[in-house]
Amino acid sequence: MAMHLPGFKSEPEDNQSGPEVEVRIRGLMIDSSTKMPIVVLNDLAGEVVLPIWVGIFEANAIALEMEKATTFRPWTHDLLRNAIDSLNGRVTRVVVGDLREDTFHATVWMDQAGEVIALDARPSDAIALALRSDCPIFVSQQVYEQARRSSNGSSTLSPEELRRWLENLNDDEMGRYKM
């Protein structure tokens, strides 16, 4: 039986975005020019870096979970995880699978009683939920390529220079995201 609700996909779409690469969060940092938070994703081999600019509240939700900080009341992502758990569901993976008009799109993949359910999400929300659900995060190879192409000419650094700069940041330079 397939789930047919708006915003949900019942089955994976034959890997339309191509091969996927598992990533980890390299860190959170602030873009000095825009003052916007950036989630820096890194493939497990440490060879590919993908920065995703996110909102301040989403960055805070990610930072709190990365630091395993406890809060007095559940945040939205905690509420969502608790609702999924209460409905005997399980988040199995998160995929940043599309980049359209300089906006990343993600999918949260869940399992409920053997049924596969996919929910469209902002990458920041999907990442915050993945951290709380202890599930892997993936980025499609197509997204890496699109991000590399779309950054051509839109930055003072070339895509290769930006990649090298992000890859060579040490833990002190990367810093810890603070509110």
Image (cartoon, rainbow, N blue to C red):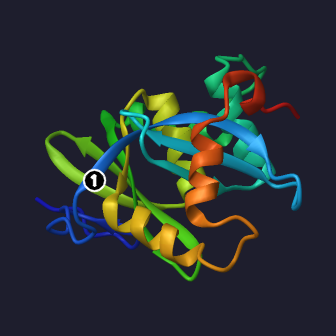
Q: Which image quarter: residue 2?
A: bottom left
In the displayed structure, does residue 75 sit left or right of residue 15?
right
Frontmost residue, 90 versus 62: 62
Residue 107 image point, x, y percent: 39, 58
**Residue at the spot 76% in from the left edge and 30% down from the top edge:** 173
Residue 30 image point, x, y percent: 81, 46
Say which residue label 1 marks. Answer: 20
Q: Quadrant of the C terminus?
A: top right
Residue 46 image point, x, y percent: 43, 35
Query: What is the three-letter code of the residue carrying label 1?
Result: Glu
- Label 1: few (<14), some or many (≥20) within 10 Å? some
Q: Is residue 82 visible?
A: no
Q: Is residue 10 visible?
A: yes
Q: Residue furthest left?
A: 1
Residue 157 sits above or below residue 91 on the image = below
Q: Quadrant of the N terminus?
A: bottom left
In the displayed structure, does residue 28 sit left or right of residue 45?
right
Secondary structure category for the residue under label 1: strand
Frontmost residue, 79 versus 15: 15
**Residue at the spot 51% in from the left edge and 40% down from the top edge:** 129
**Residue at the spot 75% in from the left edge and 21% down from the top edge:** 71
